[in-house]
Amino acid sequence: MEKIIINGGKSLKGEVIITGAKNAALGILPATVLAKDKFIIENIPDIQDIKNYISILKKMGAKIRKEGNKLRIDTTNIGGYTVEEICEESTKMRASYYLLGALLGRNGEVELPLPGGCDIGARPIDLHIKGFAALGGEIDLKGSIKIKANKLKGANIYMDMVSVGATINVMLASVKAEGLTVIENAAKEPHVVDIANFLNLMGADVKGAGTDVIKVRGVKELHGCEYSVVPDQITAGTYMIAAGVTKGNILVKNIIPKHLESISAKLKEMGIEVIEYDDAIRVIGTDDIKPCNVKTLPYPGFPTDLQQPMGVLMCFANGVSTIRESIFENRFRYVNELQKMGASIQVNANTAVFTGPCKLYAAQINATDLRAGAAMVLAGLAAEGTTQISELKHIDRGYENIEEIFKSLGADIKRVKN
């Protein structure tokens, strides 16, 4: 067990270089399974979810070599495995379910354990199953997930609700299916587009990614390629919000500002200065933070993955701010931790009301999930005194060297053995 210890109250200044997007990389790695070939994937984040995926793929027979932020992957000999062999890693992360679509596309059958991930509410995979069934898969959910198809055939698939995971999984399963697959009400997130671009570089025929209708025309074979993962909009947004929380001045580099428009707009609304460049954004905090209202929505709306860090910022606003969570119903567990630090927050169903400005005081707090963990770090950076954060396994799933990056910005932060 480890803890992060923060002596808060320092204004952060400096530069942060953003690495590849976690959510894109977690779809690209299983996509390599669709071909029996070699790949070079660059800009891979050094996070626990990626390490788990590498372990799973190795157990399945892939050869993988890590060179800095680059992976060399050979999927030629992926073959037999047992559910028990990959169970430990699979149940630690949600994105293990992308192997359902990838292995179904490669072999016409697949068996996997049920996926894991953060406890942020009901996260069924019924839309994934609906998509696989429409493509010709026979589904058995007794104990594990088993899918078999004599032949995958293209189909028209309407997503009953916008789902990033289901959109990606159906893309993976359909790229080698016979005929045309049309995914309606598809997710439009940047990582959906990135995975579609990667598939096309492998030889797939995917059109419309980034819109709500994606068309996939099946091809017989796919091949290896070289690819660089898109920058992580959620990591970038976290450091942008950190500048506001600490009244700092942070230049966030190696990003696509278009992907961050909803975050930039809210920061500007709160009186925080945001300066956009071609591939960077500078955020300059203020003593006079204005209240605002946020509703989480699928892209291009405000991302659910940044509502917890935004909640920390709202604690310092002069007035009443609200967050309405429309994606996951259990994403306000972090509020209890902020209340320990003196925050004035009321939660009613899917809405949280923040009354500020508050003075946060150091406390012993927990990272209740991945993005809440980042929020706890931001709270500790702004709080008076020494904050201790436990359950770092959640943070490590999605943030690379978070304490070292904040230390480079001037924070008094360290990781210690508990």
Image (cartoon, rainbow, N blue to C red):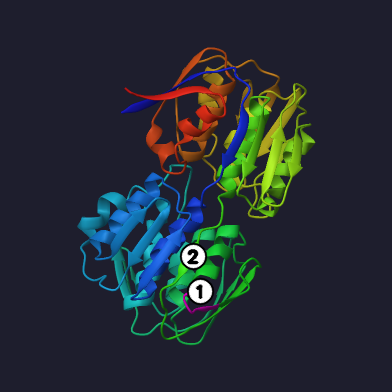
Left or right, 250 with reference to 79: right
- The x, y position of residue 315, in whole percent, is 66, 24
- The x, y position of residue 326, in whole percent, is 62, 47
Give the extent of the magenta segment.
201-205
SS at badge 1: helix
Residue shown at 40% from the left, 62% from the top: 29
Residue indicated by mark 2: 227
**Residue flagged by tag 1: what amino acid is it?**
Leu
* Front residue of 381 and 87: 381
**Residue flagged by tag 2: what amino acid is it?**
Tyr
Residue shown at 29% from the left, 57% from the top: 56
Left or right, 273 with reference to 403: right
Q: CA distance from mark 2 to mark 1?
A: 8 Å
Vertical placement of residue 357 versus 109, above or below: above
Vertical placement of residue 295 versus 100, above or below: above
The answer to if 203 sits in the magenta stretch is yes
Q: Residue 201: give its label.
A: 1
Q: Quadrant of residue 355?
A: top right
- The x, y position of residue 201, in whole percent, is 51, 74
